[in-house]
Image: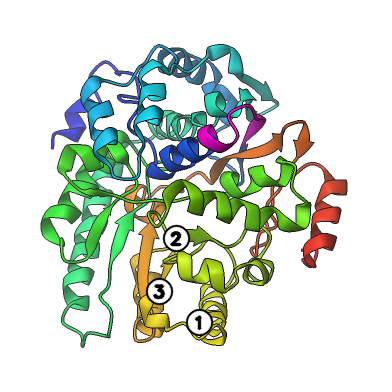
Amino acid sequence: MQLESELTMPMAPIVRSLLETDLYKFTMWQALLHSHPNSHTEYEFVCRNTPVFPLAELKEAVERELDHLCTMAFAEDELDYLRALRYIKSDFVDFLAVFRFQRKFIHVSTDGDALRIHAAGPQVHVMAFEIFVLYIVNELYFRRFDGAAALAEGRLRLDDKIAELHAFGQQPALRHPFEFSDFGVRRRFSAAWHEEVVLRLAQEVPQYFRGTSNVYLAKRFNLIPIGTMAHEYMQSFQAFGVRLRDFQKAALEAWVQEYRGDLGVALTDVVGMDAFLDDFDLYFAKLFDGLRHDSGDPVVWGEKALAHYAALRIDGNTKRLVFSDGLNLQRAFALYRHFAGRIMTGFGIGTNLTNDVGLTPLNIVMKLVCCNGQSVAKLSDSPGKTLCKDETFLAYLRQVFKHPAQ
């Protein structure tokens, strides 16, 4: 691919398709459209680390990209692709056929050096902004660096990763195979680099590379689109009128009713793994295919999951643990060796695939902070991942779920 030449060409809009987002945006979107179509939500952009230059300098460019995003629609072939996915329902595709992002629902401002992006409106009209906002900011930011040097370094590192995968394949196999997927759309170096990485992995290590969360690339390269749910889905149920103590069970039950056996990997760390397992009884443990890790010590988390399945007399070899928290291949290999003799595993690798080019990645998120007029929050098992300005609600949430303050 001639990526270097693209650096000197006039810049096309960053978002090239409304299909280019994480699969779990569509799966959560459908579930919430069907179960809670009238909910009102607010999302906030946050950068968790210190960038090389102030993100506030990107404000005008971000505004232009969002203006463009709000002119876009799904193409007919994209709608046909979604309709062909077994778990996507036809009425949801009909909704997407007329869907347009509304510019009035998203606002960009600055606070000193910080970039502020706030989306507020009906959840089914604002929830999909997240991934587009993140990779818009990311790509605008990295355009200011030496792109040719970054790509050269990225290709060397990708060569090393592919060599590591081939070497890994020479080791004795465990009971279950090693499989990993691309989860890197939101913090990628660029769209073109993301495409190159995914294509090379699909061509050179297909025995390990299972697919991508990027639905656009899955369609383009005939790969499996990967994803189920994210924190915002579970968090929304904190404000949907059920008793707070029961929000996880309500969210899991709604998911079961929507997908009826498809998309069976549950996210565990909205209020901590211990509180999740308290709610993940035999009913849910049999209905869901597995669990996804996204914070805390992955070995401790996985051992808790295995112990829970054992206590319920469920054979761990029939279930799957999916790891997705800041992974690189070496961490994935270590976790695979630890667990794959006892349970199926999967690994979602993001930034270390699509933005490993010798530059420090941005640690940016855009999280749900309010639903139906009340605060919602995640009590992460990792310090620094909790995002909520309402300390009163956080304290109450910790009390209800016996989650220690960090």
Q: Quadrant of residue 78?
A: top left
Residue in view at x 36 percent, y 40 percent: 189
Estimate the spatial distance between the alpha carbons at disc 1 and disc 2, rounded to whole Å: 15 Å
Q: Residues within 10 Å of mark 3 (few under 14, many from 20)?
A: many
Residue in view at x 51 percent, y 71 percent: 285
Q: What's the colour scheme?
A: rainbow
Q: Amino acid at mark 2?
A: Val
Q: Residues within 10 Å of mark 2 (few under 14, many from 20)?
A: some
Classify 73 as above or below 271. above
Classify 294 as above or below 138. below
Classify 339 as above or below 16. below
Determine which residue is flagged by label 3. Answer: 319
Q: Quadrant of residue 404?
A: bottom right
Which residue is more in the foreground, 225 or 186?
A: 225
Q: Quadrant of residue 4?
A: top left
Q: What is the x, y in percent for residue 329?
A: 33, 67
Residue in view at x 35 percent, y 28 percent: 93
Label 1: which secondary element: helix
Q: Give the position of the C terminus as an image quadrant.
A: bottom right
Label 2: which secondary element: strand
The answer, for residue 192, to whether it is visible in the render is no
* Mark earlier in primary sequence (2, 3): 2
The answer, for residue 224, to whether it is visible in the render is yes
Among all residues in the image, which is located at the extreme right? 392
Estimate the spatial distance between the alpha carbons at disc 2 and disc 3, rounded to whole Å: 9 Å
Classify 42 as above or below 292. above
* Mark earlier in primary sequence (1, 3): 1
Determine which residue is flagged by label 1. Answer: 306
Mark 1 near mark 2, Cβ–Cβ under 8 Å? no
Q: What is the x, y in percent for residue 372?
A: 73, 32
Q: Is residue 138 magenta?
A: no
Instruction: Please report the bounds of the magenta region as a residue range.
Output: 33-45
